Amino acid sequence: MTQSRKRQLKLGIGLQGAGGHWRDPEVESNGAVSIAAYQEYARIAEAAKFDFGFIADSAYITKHSTIPFLSRLEPMTALSAISAVTKHLGLVGTFTTSYSEPYTTARQLASLDIISDGRAGWNAVTSALEGVARNHGHDKLHDHALRYRIAKEYIEVVKGLWNSWEDDAFTRNKETGEYVDLDKLHTLDHVGEFFKVQGPLNLERSKQGHPIIFQAGASEAGRDLAGRYADAVFTSFEDADLEKAKQTYRDIKSRTASYGRNPDEVLLFPMISPVVGATAEEAQERYEEGNQYIDVDYAVKYLSRYFSFFDFSQFDLDQPLPELGDIGQNSFRSMAEYYLRIAREENLTLRQLAYRATNPRGDFVGTAEAIADKFQHYFEERAVDGFIVAGSHRNLRNFTKLVVPILQERGLFRTEYESDTLRGNLGVSFPVNRYTEARNQTAIHG
């Protein structure tokens, strides 16, 4: 399948059930560990014909960690449970390339892909917190460049394992007694700089071939990894800066083309938190209402995560942030640089910056028509291919009830699913198994 149909917006939803707004009466206080809360997000999204649900993750906490990270469901387990109550929604989870084994990740994701009948996706991250390293037997975090070298080889290994079986290997013919054609099984025998993996994978390919690969790094190395391997990219939106978003869009599409891949099949998604009101004033009131449930200590802790949990408590909340040097350069580099830049440019106090990080207003607080107009503008200006929307159940129900129909009326978003796989709905071509391709070429040319 190729992307020949008209270009349309793609939509994802954040699946986590609670965050800094856990005190909101309309938010489940235990949403981070309530599979019912996750499933409710999935139902909201599938009823509105969204492409996928997404679960972010981290494998490190301290007593200073923000509330949603202290106790939360592991992505693979949660997504498997969500798959049982959905039929079309893609299921995307975050799994590290730095502190896990490629064979295990390949098998887990391929299993989710089979269980969900071709709806799995992998957000491949390099892990940017030193505590994650210590939780996996390492003394310190790999430096930024090394993490991305490891990630490159890791993804190559996982994709190689996903090619262990040709697509039609499992015949399961009861009449002839043939269960599988073992000539269509291939051993990887990978020996590289970081990994030594024999294979093959003990799981066949799904109806979408293998899971969709997502990538979130915004640094130079992250963008290059995205251009080389990703089918979809999570991008930052930095106060909905259209020109900056367009530059990022062009850059990643250009890198994709430089690797001989179709840039139309690599989709860019910023995450936003839309708040819809009958009037602009009502939407602003709803946004500000959400802030009252966020404690400032929580907000400061949330901000610190982008800076390897740097201790901001030593600073006055109501004074501008002092010069911090290169703190954050080996953690969430692009986000750390962004927050330092806006703090400097806008002379923000620590309190203001913390709330900006925790509950960014963005450019999507307003009436349904106004939000739909902005979606259309960013999409048609080729700054994005879609959006991941996050927020409370109430806010997202309002979004799907009020904004999505406008997008559908304008022909910007589907009214029915085009496919029963994530790959098909995103419009990304089926991944040809290189062994099947070689066999077909041999048959053609004798």
Image (cartoon, helix red, strand yellow):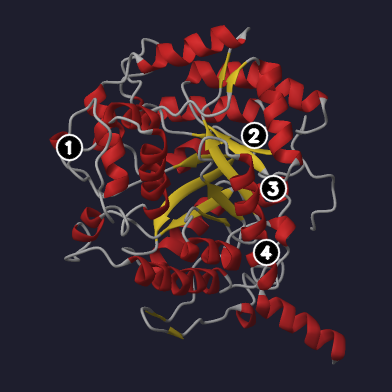
Q: How far, Cα to Cα, is label 4 from label 2? A: 27 Å
At 74% from the left and 21% from the top, the residue drawn is 405
Sequence-wise, the earlier of marks 1 and 3 is: 1
For this view, does 67 lie left or right of residue 210? left
Residue at point 42% right, 33% down? 16
Q: What residue is pinned by disc 1?
A: 64
The C terminus appears in which quarter of the rendering?
Answer: bottom right
Q: Is residue 410 left or right of residue 76?
A: right
The type of residue carrying mark 4 is: Ser
Q: Which residue is mark 4?
A: 254
Residue 198 in the image: state x and y as whole percent.
Answer: 43, 81
Mark 2 and mark 3 in contact? Answer it, CB < 8 Å: no
User: Looking at the image, which residue is at 65% across and 16% down?
Assistant: 401
> Which image quadrant: the N terminus?
bottom right
Residue at 38%, 42% (x, y): give it.
339
Graded by Cα atoms within 10 Å as few (under 14), some (14 to 19) or many (20 or more), the crowding at tag 2 reads many
Label 2 to label 3, Cα distance in Å?
10 Å
The amino acid type found where label 1 is placed reads: His
User: Do labels 4 and 2 touch, CB within 8 Å?
Assistant: no
> Mark 1: few, some, or many residues within 10 Å (few <14, many ≥20)?
some
> x and y percent of residue 110 in the render?
52, 58
* Mark identifier at residue 50: 2
**Disc 3, SS:** helix
Q: Residues within 10 Å of mark 4 (few under 14, many from 20)?
A: some
User: Which residue type does callout 3 highlight?
Assistant: Leu
Residue 49 locus on image (x, y percent): 68, 31
Mark 4 or mark 2: whose residue is earlier in sequence:
2
What residue did someone put label 3 on? 426
